[in-house]
Image (tube, grey):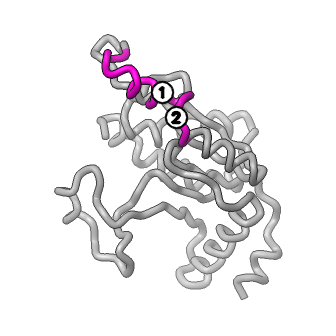
Amino acid sequence: MVDEHVAKLPRRKLVVLTVASDRRMRNERGEPVERERELDERVRCEDVSGLRILKASAAYHGLRLVALGTQEPFSGFGSKLLLPLAWGEQQLASGALRRSDVVLFTDAFDTFFACGEEEILRKLAAAEAEAREQDGAQGVLLVSGERFCWPSEERSGRFPAAPTPYRFLNGGGCVGAAGDYLEQVRGARPRMEEGD
């Protein structure tokens, strides 16, 4: 029954986002801290092979990758939410993005794509249909999970048990309708502005 529902869905646009800020350490004046030159060069966003791999895999699968923050200093992990939120709100206001379009957010430096738009949209539509059938859910936001509570292991007790070992949310991967994605990120915004 889920497959029948997927076949009847209207076409949605997929937008793939990443945040690729300059990850060099900076002093209080915002200047790069002098460190071993090799390391400094390795972590600059335009030189990191991981970002090249992400871009190449996106191109291979015909995905248009929007890299946010490439000319900005790294301001903390909250930028993984704040930069896409600002971008998404601007795109919605201009009409370039609809609430029903799909946003896929991924980390920039340690990820790659293994499939293209058609498969991503098909799998999301199947998850949405399954959630509607099971729970009557109106929207689905799939967020990656991990086995360890990083970077704050001491917070692991705040998370409930889960049916899989991947009970800890990981902001490095998320996909869902733009409206649902932005609503969830907007709700987390006050905490992100306070710091990581």
Q: Determine which quarter of the picture holds residue 130.
A: bottom right
Seen from the viewer's position, the closer of residues 21 and 44 is: 44
- Circle on res. 115: none
Are circles 2 and 1 on residues that touch, CB within 8 Å? Answer: yes
Extent of the magenta region: 32-50
Whole-Å distance between the Cαs marked 2 and 1? 6 Å
Q: Is residue 29 above or below residue 174?
A: above
- How many numbered tags mark residues here? 2
Residue 155 x %, y %: 21, 57
Q: Amino acid at mark 2?
A: Val
Which residue occupies 53% across, 64% down?
A: 142
Left or right of 176 on screen, residue 143: left
Q: Residue reaching furthest left?
A: 154
The majority secondary structure of the magenta stretch comes to: helix
The quarter in which the N terminus is drawn is bottom right
Tell me the residue that label 1 is attached to: 44
Q: Amino acid at mark 1?
A: Arg
Residue 23 x %, y %: 42, 30
Seen from the viewer's position, the closer of residues 109 and 158 is: 109
The quarter in which the C terminus is drawn is top left
Q: Please, what secondary structure does the residue beneath circle 2 have? A: loop
